[in-house]
Image (spheres, grey):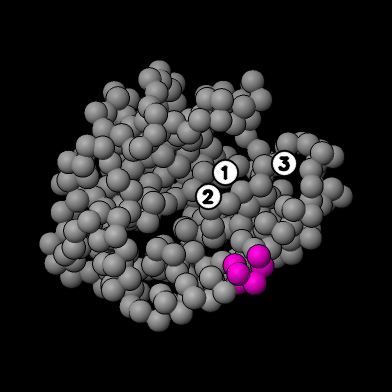
């Protein structure tokens, strides 16, 4: 099994690592959407996200895609009080053990990828498996999966943060705020009921929008911190043409989650499809853009 997985990885890298970003993105885009991507005339939001992947590459993108380094950016922009408490960071997965972790719930994750390890009670955890998972994550370079350049030069590390929990000991809703040209355009709220993943879109006034992802939707009440989340998201998005600002709110307090520059790598499908075009019409791309 190990040998088979290893050979699959080698085959994958040999097939894709040596082709240009533009060629790879065009190939993958057609595979997902069924039509050719035209970089000269991007129209939908996903087409424009692909354009930004190629032509909007700066050191600030790398800093802010790094879940550890972005903390400094957030502190400079809105203050440290919105940061989730950091317990420690490390380059060694073996540091994630019963002796080094606090007695309260935490989350251990890498700074450059998606996977997380939720540790509610360290006395009940299988740290061997957690360390193995984190070791594998540290080896990955997320850039090669979607050609999101900002991940290419991040130095992988592990960060351990306090796990946010509400009064019922549940993980809070994830408010993913889509910002275009420095302004909030919509909320994507990720929730869960009985292990089910629920994704619902709302406008700035928190009115439910008439499109969806391939997930169930919900009907939420307007959060009391809505205006504060909009204010913070727009401050954090001012340096970028597009960014999704992920926030949490507990007991009327807002916490920063992360910044995402190309949701789903720019391959996320909407239902109905014309929502892709409607969102694309909102985002204005720059002219004569030069990368760092």
Per the image, the residue denoted by label 1 is 83
Task: Name, please, the residue furthest toward the right.
Answer: 99
Between tags 2 and 1, which lies in front? 1
Q: Residue 103 location, x and y as percent? A: 81, 38
For this rendering, which residue is in front, 269 or 172?
269
User: Counting residues from the N terminus, which is met first, the one under dot 1 or under dot 3?
Assistant: 1
Residue 185 falls left or right of residue 194: left
Per the image, the residue denoted by label 3 is 119
- Secondary structure under tag 1 reads loop
- Asked if the magenta segment contains residue 184, the reply would be no
Based on the displayed image, in which of its 4 quarters is residue 178 positioned? top left
Per the image, the residue denoted by label 2 is 75
- Secondary structure under tag 3 reads strand
* Residue in the picture at 35% in, 37% down: 214
Q: Residues within 10 Å of mark 2 (few under 14, many from 20)?
A: few
Q: Residues within 10 Å of mark 3 (few under 14, many from 20)?
A: many
Q: Is residue 54 visible?
A: no
Q: Residues within 10 Å of mark 1 (few under 14, many from 20)?
A: some
Q: Quadrant of the C terminus?
A: bottom left
User: Counting residues from the N terminus, which is met first, the one under dot 2 or under dot 3?
Assistant: 2
- Do the residues bearing badges 1 and 3 touch, measured as CB atoms within 8 Å? no
- Do the residues bearing badges 2 and 1 touch, measured as CB atoms within 8 Å? yes
* Residue in the picture at 41% in, 39% down: 176
- Secondary structure under tag 2 reads helix
Residue interval drawn in magenta: 1-6
User: Counting residues from the N terminus, which is met first, the one under dot 2 or under dot 1?
Assistant: 2
* Residue in the picture at 74% in, 57% down: 131
What is the CA distance from the residue labelled 1 to the residue labelled 3?
Answer: 19 Å
Q: Residue 219 location, x and y as percent? A: 38, 20
- Asked if the magenta segment contains residue 3, the reply would be yes
Based on the displayed image, in which of its 4 quarters is residue 201 positioned? top left
Q: Residue 213 location, x and y as percent? A: 34, 38
């Amino acid at each position: 099994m190990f040998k088979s997985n290893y050979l699959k990885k080698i085959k994958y890298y040999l097939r894709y690592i040596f082709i240009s970003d533009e060629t790879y993105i065009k190939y993958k885009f057609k595979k997902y959407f069924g039509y050719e991507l035209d970089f000269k005339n991007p129209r939908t939001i996903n087409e424009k996200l692909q354009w930004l992947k190629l032509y909007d590459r700066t050191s600030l993108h790398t800093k802010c895609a790094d879940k550890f380094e972005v903390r400094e950016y957030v502190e400079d922009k809105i203050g440290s009080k919105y940061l989730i408490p950091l317990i420690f960071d490390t380059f060694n997965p073996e540091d994630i053990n019963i002796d080094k972790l606090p007695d309260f719930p935490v989350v251990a994750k890498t700074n450059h990828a998606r996977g997380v390890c939720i540790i509610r009670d360290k006395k009940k955890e299988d740290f061997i498996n957690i360390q193995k998972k984190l070791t594998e994550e540290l080896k990955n370079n997320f850039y090669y999966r979607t050609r999101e350049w900002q991940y290419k030069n991040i130095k992988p590390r592990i960060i351990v943060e306090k796990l946010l929990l509400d009064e019922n000991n549940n993980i809070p809703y994830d408010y993913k705020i889509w910002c275009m040209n420095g302004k909030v355009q919509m909320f994507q709220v990720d929730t869960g009921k009985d292990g089910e993943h629920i994704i619902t879109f709302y406008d700035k006034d928190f009115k439910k929008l008439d499109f969806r992802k391939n997930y169930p939707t919900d009907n939420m009440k307007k959060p009391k911190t809505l205006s504060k989340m909009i204010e913070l998201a727009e401050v954090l998005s001012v340096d970028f043409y597009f960014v999704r600002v992920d926030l949490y709110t507990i007991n009327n307090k807002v916490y920063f989650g992360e910044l995402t520059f190309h949701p789903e790598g720019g391959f996320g499908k909407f239902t109905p499809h014309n929502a892709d075009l409607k969102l694309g019409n909102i985002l204005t791309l720059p002219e004569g853009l030069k990368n760092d």
